[in-house]
Amino acid sequence: MVTLPEHVLSQYRRFSLYNSPYTAHDTGSAIDLYPDADATTAPSPVAGTVALTRTVQAPPKPYAEETDHLIVVDTGDHLVRIMHVDPDVEPGDIVAVGESLGRPVRAGFFAPWVDNHLHVGIRPRDADPVRASGSLPIEPAVDVEALAWDGRGTVVERGETYAVLDEPAHPAPGEYYVGMGTLDGQAVLDGGLPHYDCGGLLNAGTSGETDRDPVELAGGQVGVATGRDVTWDDVTVLANGEPITGIALFADRERFGAKLICPDATVAVGESVQVGIEQST
């Protein structure tokens, strides 16, 4: 387990351990760090020496660039793999926490509803720095306040593939991180419910615990937690009774509100929405 301290995380408006389809995120062994929405530079999450940069072909998507990039930083204790940044650093450069690594890249590895971010994995110094697997579980050393939500809200933003509701609202934007609380209010849900295979809990300790506890959101059970890892139940998310792709779950310090992934739904800005969870039979 590797800890990311609060002064590192506070550079970013949002973070997520589990909200991704890629295998490293299934156990929280990678973290996505989101700079400000209009950021033109990507602040480094670590200090060290740039060991490697590489350009790779990205899956072709009409909304994305053709190539992505890998930056590997040697911190002296670990190798840190950072993706989705077009580097303005090169091997041998020394970087500090917060120093720009380059320009954020919207890559074809992203789903269309995903904002620009740094994908970060941390691994032992003797590990292969290039292959996707092999990173260590990450623990964000920051409290995330759990927000209660009854599934209701009004659409305040609508994109082609998503809608953002005005609830639950951030009580103090910019001051601390918040996230979608489980029904008991003890932890914060993280992940893509249920459109990514696995989810997780923030403020819930570490993986490896054996207890299997039900996890509930908006009045319905959505999965089972083992330690901080969550296996989603076979559920369908509904918006005003209409099936949608799911809900994006993360920690955010700037603003909040349920983000519904709904490319085919008819909900519009100003419309009241009731979200429900339906167990498949």
Image (cartoon, rainbow, N blue to C red):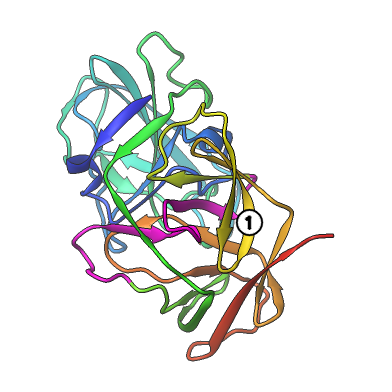
**Amino acid at dot 1:** Val
Q: Position of residue 24 (x, y in %)?
A: 53, 33
Residue projecting furthest to the bottom:
270
Q: Is residue 100 visible?
A: no
Q: Position of residue 160 (x, y in %)?
A: 56, 74
State the quadrant of the N terminus. top left
Give, as a single range, the part of the protein colored magenta. Answer: 170-197
Q: Position of residue 12 (x, y in %)?
A: 26, 51
State the quadrant of the C terminus. bottom right
Report the side of 171 relative to 210 (left or right): left
Q: Is residue 187 magenta?
A: yes
Q: What residue sits 35% from the left and 12% below the top?
A: 125
Q: Which residue is mark 1?
A: 222
Mark 1 crowdedness (10 Å alpha carbons): few <14, some 14-19, many ≥20: many
Above or below, comparing residue 68 to residue 275 in the picture:
above
Q: Is residue 196 visible?
A: yes
Q: Nearer the viewer, residue 272 or 223?
A: 223
